[in-house]
Structure formats: structure tokens, C-alpha cells
């Protein structure tokens, strides 16, 4: 185990980007993690990561006589895939969590591609692990993410997935500047998944009410 203040030094090195296996091993050695988190890191996370890679090669969208593979998806193809995905939801909301766990590899694969279309890059390994842990641990989780590791994108991915199940998502931050920046800068990514986004940091009362 190592103290929390040394966590950033352990997982990040500017001259050496750690692989997913290295990060998993490092996190399992952290004495601050609960047994349930360690079990998830040892079994569920590796299985999910393999399933995401498999989904990337299997996902396609049928349009007429054409079958479009994921790596050829445009933004419009992503929107259409998301609509089909939402049409597959079980009618009973209590089964949404079961549905999400079954569909999670496909959803994350499509979201990764959508992010690449918008930005030219995909999630880093630390971000993939953070998103995966939050989604697999459904009994609450507190994470410490080092400065510069991309908390904003982690939050975007989690918010999008919750919103896809027609849930309203509130993202809370102590910084008005970051709230405005992320709501505006990430709007195109949210919109690709048929999700609207706003912030309530305006000095205008009417605009704040509308955002809420």
C-alpha cells in the first residue's frame, strides 16, 4: 500500500505510459481498495476490456444492402446505432442495470469511436479503468483521479451512459469555470449520443431556471 498523496506518481510517468495490465496490478496492490473492488479488478474488469475489443470488430449497422462496420461509422451512424440500442431497452426499468451490464462492451466501444470522431483520440488506460469500475460497481464508489488524467471525459462517459437509459444526470463541481467549459466544449459529443447538456452558472436568473 502507498499513501494517497503518492498515487499520481505511482500511476503516471510522463516518459512511460502504463499498460492496462500494469495499472490493474498496481491498483490490486493498493491497500486502500476494498475486497469487492479488488475482485472487480481481478476478474470483471479484464473480462470487460476483452469484450470491448471484441465488440469493436463485431459491431455494425445495416443500411439497406450495406453492412457498415464500427470503424467506418460517421457521427450519423453513431446516432442511428444509439437509437437502435435504446429501442432494445426492457420495458421494466428495474431490468435496466441487467441490460447495461450485458450491453456495456458494445456501448463503450461505440462511445470510444464517437470520441475519436470528435477529438482524434480515445480514452487513456486510466480513464477506461475509472469508467469501467464506476459502471461495474453498482453499490457506490469513491475514486481518486490524478490531476491531468482526464476527469472531465470520465464524467462525460458516465453521464452519457446514464442518460441513454433516459435518466436525468446532474454533474456537480465547485468550479463555475469548469462547469461552463465542459458543458460548452463537450456539447458536440453529448449531442452525438442524442443528449442535451447545459449549465446553471449564468448570472441571469431566467437562464439558470431554464438550465435546471
Image (cartoon, helix red, strand yellow):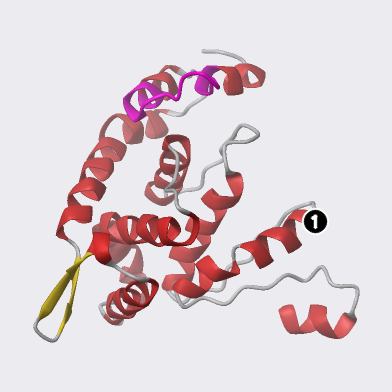
Q: Per the image, is 23 magenta? A: yes
Q: Which residue corresponds to the image point at 45% horizontal and 39% vertical from the top-left?
A: 124
Answer above or below: position of 206 versus 168.
below
Q: Secondary structure at mark 1?
A: helix
Image check: 142 left or right of 126?
Answer: right
Q: Is residue 43 above or below residue 82?
A: above
- What residue sits right under mark 1 in the picture? 177
The location of residue 106, given as percent across then percent down, is 26, 59
Any magenta on residue 132?
no
Query: In which quadrant of the rendered image does the C terminus lie?
Result: bottom right
Of residue 47 and residue 10, the one placed in the foreground of this image is 10
Q: Residue furthest left?
A: 65
User: What's the residue at 57%, 43% (across, down)?
Assistant: 150
The foreground one among 77 and 82 is 77
For residue 40, above or below residue 157: above
Labels in figure, total: 1
Q: Position of residue 48 (x, y in %)?
A: 27, 44
Q: Which residues are magenta?
A: 10-24
Give percent across and percent down for residue 113: 36, 58
The image shows residue 181, relative to residue 49, as above or below, that is below
Q: Would residue 118 appear left or right of 108 to someone viewing this image?
A: right
Question: In the image, residue 144 lies at what x, y percent?
Answer: 59, 34
Amino acid at each position: 500500500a502507498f499513501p494517497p498523496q503518492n498515487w499520481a506518481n505511482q500511476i503516471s510517468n510522463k516518459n512511460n505510459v502504463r499498460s492496462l495490465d500494469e495499472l490493474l496490478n498496481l491498483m490490486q496492490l493498493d491497500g486502500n481498495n476494498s475486497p469487492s473492488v479488488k475482485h472487480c479488478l481481478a476478474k470483471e474488469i479484464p473480462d470487460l476490456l476483452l469484450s470491448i475489443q471484441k465488440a469493436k470488430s463485431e459491431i455494425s449497422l445495416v443500411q439497406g444492402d450495406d453492412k457498415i462496420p464500427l470503424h467506418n461509422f460517421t457521427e450519423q451512424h453513431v446516432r442511428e446505432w444509439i437509437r437502435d440500442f435504446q429501442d432494445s431497452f426492457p420495458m421494466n426499468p428495474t431490468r435496466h442495470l441487467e441490460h447495461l451490464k450485458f450491453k456495456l462492451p458494445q456501448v463503450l466501444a461505440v462511445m470510444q469511436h464517437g470520441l475519436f470522431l470528435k477529438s482524434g483520440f480515445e480514452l487513456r488506460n486510466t480513464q477506461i479503468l475509472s469508467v469501467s469500475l464506476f459502471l461495474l460497481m453498482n453499490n457506490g464508489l469513491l475514486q481518486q483521479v490524478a490531476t491531468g488524467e482526464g476527469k472531465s471525459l470520465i464524467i462525460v462517459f458516465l453521464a452519457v451512459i446514464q442518460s441513454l437509459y433516459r435518466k436525468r444526470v446532474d454533474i456537480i463541481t465547485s468550479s463555475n469555470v469548469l462547469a461552463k467549459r465542459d458543458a460548452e466544449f463537450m456539447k458536440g459529443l453529448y449531442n452525438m449520443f442524442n443528449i442535451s447538456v447545459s449549465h446553471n452558472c449564468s448570472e441571469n436568473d431566467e437562464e439558470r431556471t431554464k438550465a435546471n
